[in-house]
Amino acid sequence: MAELRGALIGCGFFAVNQMHGWALAQGAGIVAICDRDPQRLAIVGDQFGISRRYTDAAAMFADGGFDFVDIATTVQSHRALVEMAAAHKVPAICQKPFAPSLADAKAMVAVTNAAGIALMIHENFRWQTPIQAVRKVLDSGAIGTPFWGRFSFRSGFDVFAAQPYLGEAPRFIIEDLGIHTLDIARYILGDVHSLTARTRRINPKIKGEDVATMLLDHDSGATSIVDVSYATRQETEPFPETLIELDGSEGTLRLTQGYALTVTNGDGTVTTDVSPALLPFASRPWHNIQESVLLIQQHWVDALKAGTETSTSGADNLKTFALVEAAYQSAASGQLVEIGTLLA
């Protein structure tokens, strides 16, 4: 099949990683870009040799000439852009968080379903090499049936230096980072039926929460803790690693700092290096995230060509987004939240 032609909307901080990823993806490439800021449009266009440049998404869709669109804008514009893609029958990738509200996200899934087009949320964390390695160990049966887990991202990294707008958001760590960690918990241990959360704001210079601890009850019977922090200073900064602990009926699994995956069972203990690749455009410590961008993009291309549903489809990501909403509800009320009530 011929190479798929893509269009990218949004040329901000993270979109550069996506453009690098598309340059390496097999079977697809970006032919048009769009951003309301002419300066950012010029920088990205010049860097990647893209001549078709637009400051208006409607004009780009009207001109057409592409097979899918990658929406890399901030959350407030997601619904309108996905609806625009649906109106033009163009399959769409949408950056996380999915939408400003769960109602908007549900509407976006409905409109793309009605249009008969694919919608994938750019939930790249589950595509990180160490996370995929954890999934493979679990699928192999090496630790039996998991009954407890912990998914932890604790850091003192200054994320506000490159993304100052994060400090202005009334919702911060759960919506920006916890959404990834919650998705990993779902990916590894399955869907969740109830959640309890507690949050704190440690940094006085920001508006939202920068610490969150969540207790998840999975449909499988497993219990997990998802804890995220940008207020945790450690001797060795682990950013941007997600650390995982799993206890199963036949053994245990530990993904520890430095990408070491240790499995202990009746056969003994084995530790494997599951470090991500350092791609040509990547830099440490971001290389883990940067590699996952390419991996999820390749997954999109392969699924689009095969006509199969993506791992992080809009329908799947509704379940992750519901956990985010449940976490904020629980933190505000101090009560357990049933996930089914949000997805109904």
Image (tube, helix red, strand yellow):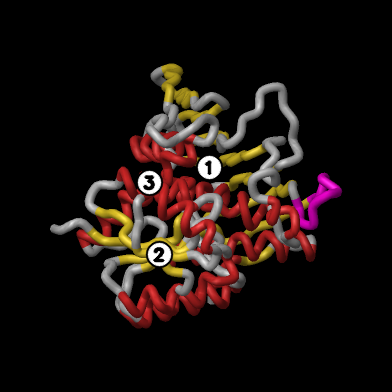
The amino acid sitting under disc 1 is Phe
Task: Tell me the number on the disc at residue 317.
Answer: none
At a point 56% along the width and 35% down the height, the residue shown is 241
Q: Nearer the viewer, mark 3 or mark 1?
A: 3
Q: CA distance from mark 3 to mark 2?
A: 19 Å
Tell me where residue 217 sits by quadrant: bottom right
Say whether marks 3 and 1 touch (CB < 8 Å).
Answer: no
**Where residue 130 sits in the image (x, y, percent)?**
45, 34
Q: Nearer the viewer, mark 2 or mark 1?
A: 2
Residue wearing tag 1: 147
For mark 2, give the secondary structure: strand
Identity of the residue drawn at 62% across and 54% down:
176
Q: Of helix, strand and loop, which mostly describes the magenta segment?
A: loop
First in residue order: circle 3 vs circle 1:
3
Q: Eyeballing the image, is 67 above or below 115? A: above
**Which corner quadrant of the image does residue 12 belong to?**
bottom right
Check residue 21 in the rendering and tell me which mark sits there, or answer none. Answer: 3
Q: Which residues are magenta?
A: 200-209
Q: Is residue 92 above or below residue 181?
A: below
Quarter placement of the N terminus = bottom left
The quarter of the rendered structure image containing the C terminus is bottom right
Of 292 and 319, the residue lying toward us:
292
Residue sitting at x 36%, y 37%:
136
CA–CA distance in space, label 2 to label 1: 51 Å
- Report the residue marked by disc 2: 53
